[in-house]
Image: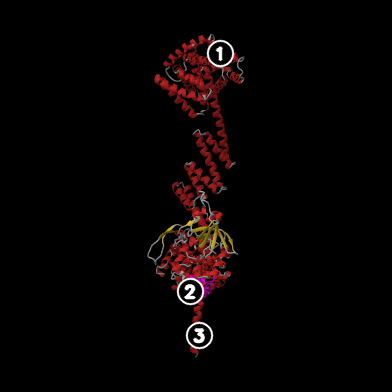
Amino acid sequence: MSTQASTSGSVNEARGRRSAEDVEDSKKHFRVCRFIIDTGVKLGMRSVPMATACALYHRFFQSASLQVYEPYLVAMSAIYLAGKVEEQHLRTRDIINVCHRYFHPEREPLELDGKFWELRDSIVQCELLILRQLNFQVSFEHPHKYLLQYLLSVRSLLNRHAWSRTPIAETALAVLKDSYHGTVCVHHKPQHLALTSLYLALQTYGVQLPRGELEWWQVVCADITKAQIETIMSELLQLYDMEAKCT
Amino acid sequence: MNGLVVLDGCADDCTMSVCVVSEAHAVMPPLEQFMEVCFEERRELFYRDVERGDLVIGRINSVRDFGLFVTLLCTAGGLERNIEDLEIKALCPLRCVPSTGNHDDPLSYYQIGDLLRAGVKGIDRYHEKLTLSLYSSSLPPHLDKVKLGVISKEDLPLHYSRGEKVTADSSQTYEKLLESSLGLSNPLNVDYLLGKLGISDTQTPSLMRGLQSKHFKEDDFATAIRKKQSVSWALKCVKVGVGHFKSRRYVEAMNEYNKALEIDTNNVEALVARGALYATKGSLMKAIEDFELALENCPTHRNAKKYLCQTLVERGGQLEEEEKLVTAEGLYKRAILLDNTFQGAAEALAKLQLRIQKSLELKEQEAAKEQEKTKTVETSAEKLRKILKEEKRMKKKRKRSTSSSTSSDTSSTSSDDDSSTSRKKSKKRKHKRRRSSHGSKKHKRRASSCSDKMADDDIEWFPAPANTSASYIDQKQSISKLISEGEQSWEKSRCEDGRGRLDDAIDRSLENLKHGAQSETSRPGRPNVNGEVRDQHRTQSISECARNRRDSSSSTQSEYSQKSDRYSKEFSSQGRDRSESERGGNEKMDRGERNSHDKDDGRKSSGGSLKKDIPSNLLDIFSQIAEFEKEKKLQK
């Protein structure tokens, strides 16, 4: 009995430890993703390359361990690689400058000396590492284009004044952008994610859409159920909670 | 983005319809259709949401004399709804149908069954009535270009034709349609759609507290940091360059400066350092450019100002040596403006101004000397002018009783004052001439013809330019006398308004001569003589021609009332041609003198020469007039 209890206890402990680790890890990931998005804004990255960078990061750490690889370096390399993949090429010099300032806001920009070139080398090496880790499959299909198409279609259902009064498009896009703090992007189909963002935005403002035989989201995505939407929504909302915990 | 030629992806049909379609994004049929919203709701929603200025497409179902009745088919802009089966009828009244200007009945252009695109003009939501218009004024400005009126099936909007396909084939879901549409695979569709929805891509909103735009500082952005980094990197290069410069390694220094400027264009320190290097090496203009650019970017840079002043002064010195005194003065003034405490500039400017003054004085002295010289030599032109003036005065004194022109008096008095000194010297000779000219007119005529012929012969033998031999001067004087006399006689014989004008013109010409003489005397001696000799030549050659071409002289008189200058110039050219054919040598000399004179003109202002031209042309005219009179007398 005691051994059983102890084993169950230890199992629970192990599970607890694991979940504690997971929580810590997810917090770490959250912070790094925040770092990626922040840097992306300062570099003037567009939405899709930024999304690719985050997706690369999440994918990488699905199969790699945080103890082995420095996450911030991976993040910087992910940004660099994403710029190349999505045709918004970024200079390593700019990436290093912004990241250096992120960590050391009080210092002057780095001198272009040996240390700088070493950093640059390490970014390039890490890039190669990411590519290998992901089996060179670095092109993603992002929810953005779907979301925008859905937005157009839904807009036609609404009265134009109601549309201009409520910032549905901005909210949906904001929700989508924030979803990249977590792993939602790699666990769900892009159409579903797009749909859920829009659903969440519409619900937030309490917008009533006309009813027909089918709900609008049923039309847009035939294979999704209400439950799935709810699940994704709760995951998205959890991210906002996490912000309070992490930062 | 617009007008992509797209192979419409109708995989079902195996037909590839090539259509020009704006498909930067997937154009989908209205969601209502997929949702199968019920009839009443759709109708209600349509009447709630349709606004003035929306585009609709419908089919004409009856043509009445007060307008057209249209059953709406689909919306074409502003609203995207599925309304075909709602059977909404709208009226397009006659006043909203544009006339074609052919005085036909405008309604005759419309048939039942035609597809019509119209703008919504008025809505009665309560009674569910729509009024349409075919005038583009009913549309909002951004839809201005849309053609209203009868359209064909091809012009039906894409979302409608796609919607038709969907109704025909129920397996076409929204998803399938979206996936199959080409617009979705457009890599730039995200950017396009964001633009369409009015959202900027680099500043997308976020709901996270930490990602709000107010938390981002301008300094943290990549471009700002890069700029700072470039500046410090460039400064490093400049420091190294200055080190090279001090050790006299100019080539390396220049390389460093150029490198610095590549890293950070318009870097102030680099520009100043490079400017200093240029100045030291002697390329002052490049140095000035660099300093100016540096001052543009940073107007308070002390070194830039200082160096610029120094360089300007140095350049001024260089220009002074090249005799470009005015430019040098400009540069010194600029230097003083920049930094009025700079002693070097003020001193240099003072020195330069003194120098300019001195040179001017020198020139004046020379000119005075020249004038004296010419007075002693008594160039023929001078004498000619004096004589003409004398004659004029005499004539005026005689005519004062008859004519009433007062302007001539004033001008003659002015010319009197001016020529007082020179007149005294040549009084003796003038008196001689006057005595010979007095007498009967007929005598004069004969004498003139004889003397003309004499002059003619003499001119033939006239050897070289710039020759002011006494014999030549005498002859010239006689000819000029004749010209003036001829002009007098012509005046007396012709009582026209032209006379008064002739007087004025002559006075003006005399004044001009005087002015011309003055400006000429201010120049150094030699070209002066050439110029005058040239004038004489022209008058000589022309007087010969006047004798030869008697017909033209009459026309000269008639045209005198018009622009005399122009004609006389033309005549002088003709005269020149004549002299070419007859006296080749003469012409060559003419040319030679003209060339030398032109060169002089190039060097100095040409104002004086213009003034000289006028009197010589007038003299030509006078000679022609003299000739004409001679002929008349002869004929009589």
Q: Which mark is residue A143?
A: none
Task: From this view, report whether residue A49 is shown above or below residue B577.
Answer: below
Secondary element at tag 1? helix
Seen from the viewer's position, the closer of residues A137 and B236 is A137
Query: Could you classify mark 2 by the number of other residues whose Cα lies within 10 Å: few (under 14), some (14-19), or many (20 or more)?
Result: some
Calculate the distance from the C-alpha at mark 1 to the C-alpha at mark 3: 145 Å
- Both labels 1 and 2 in a single chain: no
- Residue found at x 51% / y 39%: B315
Q: Are marks 1 and 2 in contact (CB under 8 Å)?
A: no
Q: Which residues are magenta?
A: A209-236
- Colouring scheme, one of rainbow, by chain, secondary structure, one colour: secondary structure
Secondary element at tag 3? helix
Q: Position of residue B24 (x, y in %)?
A: 46, 60
- Residue found at x 58% / y 14%: B394
Q: Which mark is residue B427?
A: 1
Q: To which chain does the residue with label 2 belong?
A: A
Calculate the distance from the C-alpha at mark 2 to the C-alpha at mark 3: 40 Å
Which residue, given by chain and number where applicable, does mark 3 sit on? A9
User: Can residue B243 be found in the magenta stretch?
Assistant: no
Q: Earlier in the sequence, mark 2 or mark 3?
A: 3
Calculate the distance from the C-alpha at mark 1 to the C-alpha at mark 2: 125 Å
Seen from the viewer's position, the closer of residues B40 and B277 is B40
Q: Position of residue B374 (x, y in %)?
A: 52, 19
Q: Which residue appears farthest toward the bottom when viewing the image?
A: A1
Task: From this view, report whether residue A200 is shown above or below residue A2.
Answer: above
